[in-house]
Image: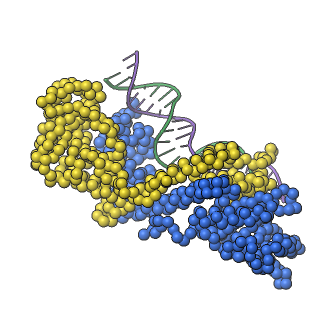
Chain colours: A blue, B yellow, C green, D purple
Amino acid sequence: MFKVGDFAKIGQVSVKTLHHYDEIGLLKPIRVDTSSGYRYYVLEQLPQLNRILVLKDLGFPLEQIATFLAEPLAIAELRGMLRLRQAELKHLVQEEQARLARVEAHLQQIEKEGSVPIYDIVVKSVAPQIIVSGREIIPSTEEVNSRCEALGIKVYQLIERMGIKITGPMYTIYHDVEAYTGQDQDIDIEMGVSVDSSTQDVHFPADSGITVRELPVVEMAACLIHTGAYEGLWQAYASMLTWIERNGYQRCGSFRFIYLRTPPDSRDPVTEVQFPVEKQSSQPYKDEME
Amino acid sequence: MFKVGDFAKIGQVSVKTLHHYDEIGLLKPIRVDTSSGYRYYVLEQLPQLNRILVLKDLGFPLEQIATFLAEPLAIAELRGMLRLRQAELKHLVQEEQARLARVEAHLQQIEKEGSVPIYDIVVKSVAPQIIVSGREIIPSTEEVNSRCEALGIKVYQLIERMGIKITGPMYTIYHDVEAYTGQDQDIDIEMGVSVDSSTQDVHFPADSGITVRELPVVEMAACLIHTGAYEGLWQAYASMLTWIERNGYQRCGSFRFIYLRTPPDSRDPVTEVQFPVEKQSSQPYKDEME
DNA sequence: TTGCTCCTCACGTCACGTGAGGTGGC
DNA sequence: TTGCTCCTCACGTCACGTGAGGTGGC
């Protein structure tokens, strides 16, 4: 019989670990002295301890290990658990590799450009929305600003006249999915605003060019917040493209500018830029799940 | 100004997260209503929140992020932190890949052999020891058992006669590092026992063939516990070799059999098998630290 | 008045580590 | 008697999630 200290030494674990396993009933000492509370272990428990350590090392939680030890555990079951664990670990490894890639993308930014990134770009999902919008093809870039503004006002006025409830800010959707350089012609844009879901059944005059539709969910969108004049948005746009490439994503679908704060508010305008993205199809190593 | 719920929505975090960031002083609302306790945020805090989310996503703890936001943070410092993070992540990815490999080794065992592993093999370090031992070359395998026993008794008797304190069990060290098959001839073995460190200065009679020496630490040893007759040790030996190969290790140095329980104890003998190992030199991908 | 949002505790998570304060065996 | 080992609380870890129980604004 061994006291905790000795058993801990041959088992290469801490005394506190044995205390803990006793407490949760995972490995109880064979005898506990009633007066002193001393725990006593026997050699036969060493293989049990090793089994625990092996399973723990494979990444199973102690609670699950306890069930493993309790029942005899059919071989098929064990295989199933291991397969599950294998899938989880593959996923985890991929996640950490992606994280590592993001860290390296930051380093690249700092070391190549010698500058700290201006924007903090996060990937998030964008909920589906009911929007009221008007869509137009604008012949040249010079007109974009004025035409967008006019279209926006038109949408607002119609909404107001019809007593519809606005639930979010206005935004521009750029439907030119191919790299939009700001130098293109015939720019396909849509100005819209999120509204209450009850608006779905409302019909707008056909000649107004304004319609209601549902904007589907975007699973992943790379997003940044731009503060300041709208001209700066094109730098944000450029940062976004670089970021998407460096972080192993690719664009999918039309991007949006969301006007979180606009004139007449006298403070700096605030705009969110959202680019739908997906993971680059050419993965690194170890993607297949067998 | 936004209430928590609204700010949480545009920032794509939970209300509880904002509460938490407030509590730890990471991102405090611009205003807290004194009577209701309501938190109010402004759009200017959205970029701050995004910065937090980006840094969190790179794997920095919130406490460290707080220091990043507090000081302006020199670019060189940020670079240093990122490099550190990069190294940590590389290490973590490797660890998880190794864990995955272990899970897959288990699966292989189950699927190829159709059996659940008999032994639970753990990798641990073995502390340095002062040992009293005798070494011999045994000409043929048949004699190993008897010669080892005789040598062991000789060591014990000498120790007893000199009044030296024993601090551990006896063990056999097999110095034939090359794969020992149990069929070899001229087997180089050593029988020893750990003793009190004060024994270091003791001199044994030269003609006894018994000496004191220090056994250096073993950083990593694959270990298993064998219970039962000594003949079974060769199966344990075989399991060990398979395991070492499947788990991406290789042997280095002489292995040991440690006699944790021996006759005359009437219960089953218990023996620990320890194989010093090192990581296989041919690594997978991504090992260099740049 | 009814919902909806907001608030503040307080406990849980996971596998122990780290004292604090006290006792038993050589 | 002095060390060494053992014991039992009890709190901390990390970033929140999850109720419980209650209040404020439309």
Relative placement, left or right, of B178 versus B46 is left
The residue positioned 88% from the left and 61% from the top of the image is: A264
Q: Position of residue A190 (x, y in %)?
A: 77, 75
Relative placement, left or right, of A179 versus B229 is right
| In-front residue for pair B128/B225 | B128
The residue positioned 72% from the left and 55% from the top of the image is: B47
Relative placement, left or right, of B290 versus A161 is left
Q: Position of residue A281 (x, y in %)?
A: 54, 71
Q: Residue B125: which quarter of the image? A: top left
Is residue B253 at least partly visible in the picture? yes
Q: Position of residue C25 (x, y in %)?
A: 33, 26
User: Residue most toward the bottom?
Assistant: A207
Q: Residue B283: which quarter of the image? A: bottom left
| Image position of A93 with respect to A10: above or below | below
| Image position of D11 with respect to B176: above or below | above
The residue positioned 15% from the left and 52% from the top of the image is: B184
The residue positioned 20% from the left and 26% from the top of the image is: B203
Is residue A30 at least partly visible in the picture? no
